[in-house]
Image (cartoon, rainbow, N blue to C red):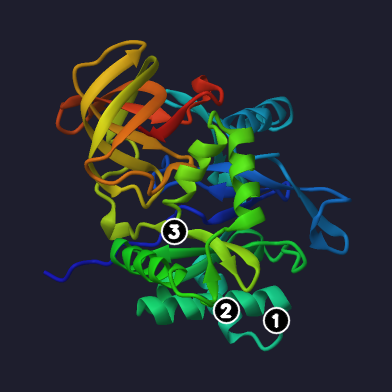
Amino acid sequence: MKKVKALRGFRDRDFIQTKEGFFFCVVGPFHPPDRVISYLKYVPAKLGAWGRGKKRFKRAMRTYTIPSLLETFSVLERDYPHYLFHSPFYNIRMTAVPYTQIVKQFKPEEKLAQLLRASRLDSLQKKLLRFTSFLAETSKISLNFFGVTGSILLNIHRPEFSDIDVTVYGLRNSLAVKNALGAEYAIPGSKVQCFKGEALKAWCEAKARNYPLTFDEALRIHERKWNVGLFECTQFSVHPVKLEHELAEEYGDKTYHPLGIVTFRAVICENTGCLFLPIVYRVQDVKVVEGSSAANIEEVVSYESLYDNLAEVGEGIEVRGKLERVLNTKTGREHHRVLVGSPEGKGTEYIKLS
């Protein structure tokens, strides 16, 4: 029997525009049947820094942290409560846009294809095309597997200060890009550079200011960061995204029951899921330092991209997060996981190399 190709749904790093003109960024690949899990990123503002002419926007979140996310919850609860949603499976309140409120879905790969065909481009769009072509050439991956997200996707970017945010689709393709960039960083005079000097200092200071990390702990995290850097002096980020046929589950296949905040140490036994959102590390040799103990903590999960690609198999980590009992509704199997970046943690949660 011929295999039917999986349909293109709502993918991580897509954007959606609502009837109010809000732009939400899609989070992860799993969504309820009538909503899209996402966070509010840009809202209309007369004096907003993004956009041009009368159509201007500002960021809804000051920083990409849980405290800033909770601030947007308060605003939405007061004026736009239909964007708040309590998931009976995740057992948390989150922002999720109802299908009835969606005006447009923005797909990164379609935007990149459109720009490749365009005859008139601004300086940042031209740089984006040079960057994606560079990635495709060095990784030997077709441009069809790349996209552009963020402000360029929405056409509200400002060439004088906007970053380049790129998506790459598929596990094999993402690993190829990761290896290609890692090799390029080691070549003197390469078109891509990792953060150094003042840029590195600023990055680490920002992470130490916004997360429960010291400057040195942020520096250790940056040492593992292959997907952020500079291309022709412009900051870039690369975001791996799973293709539909690579998804092993659907929304609702598992339920998660909160059991309190814990701190523990463990050893990584598998990290193939650390490229994508949600980030997943399989762990063993778990030793609880503080909080409720569970006999079978099997994984650490986070939706905070700061912690992607942090630890290799065999390395030790220290984790603070929300302990959850996980029930697979299809098989009946139970285990425990720890979620880093939960609303309950209020910005105190982390993953550190130990």
Which residue sits at x=83%, y=51%? Answer: 48
Helix or strand or loop: what does disc 1 sit on? loop
Is 226 drawn above or below residue 308 in the view shown?
A: below
The residue that mark 3 highlights is 226
N-terminal of the pair, mark 1 or mark 3, is 1
Q: Is residue 208 left or right of residue 182?
A: right
- Mark 2 and mark 1: Cα distance apart in space: 10 Å
Residues 28 and 176: in front is: 176
Q: Position of residue 136 (x, y in %)?
A: 42, 78
Q: Position of residue 173 (x, y in %)?
A: 33, 68
N-terminal of the pair, mark 2 or mark 1, is 1
N-terminal of the pair, mark 2 or mark 3, is 2
Q: Nearer the viewer, mark 1 or mark 3?
A: 3
Quarter of the rendering occupied by the C terminus: top left
Residues 227 and 157: in front is: 227
Disc 2, disc 1: CB below 8 Å?
yes
Helix or strand or loop: what does disc 3 sit on? loop
Dividing the picture into quadrants, the one containing residue 5 is bottom left
Residue extending farthest to the left is 1
Mark 3 closeness class: few <14, some 14–19, many ≥20 residues within 10 Å: many
In this rendering, the count of numbered labels is: 3
The residue that mark 1 highlights is 121
Q: Nearer the viewer, mark 2 or mark 3?
A: 3
The residue that mark 2 highlights is 129
Quarter of the rendering occupied by the N terminus: bottom left
Q: Position of residue 310 (x, y in %)?
A: 38, 45
The answer to whether residue 100 is visible is yes
Residues 15 and 138: in front is: 138
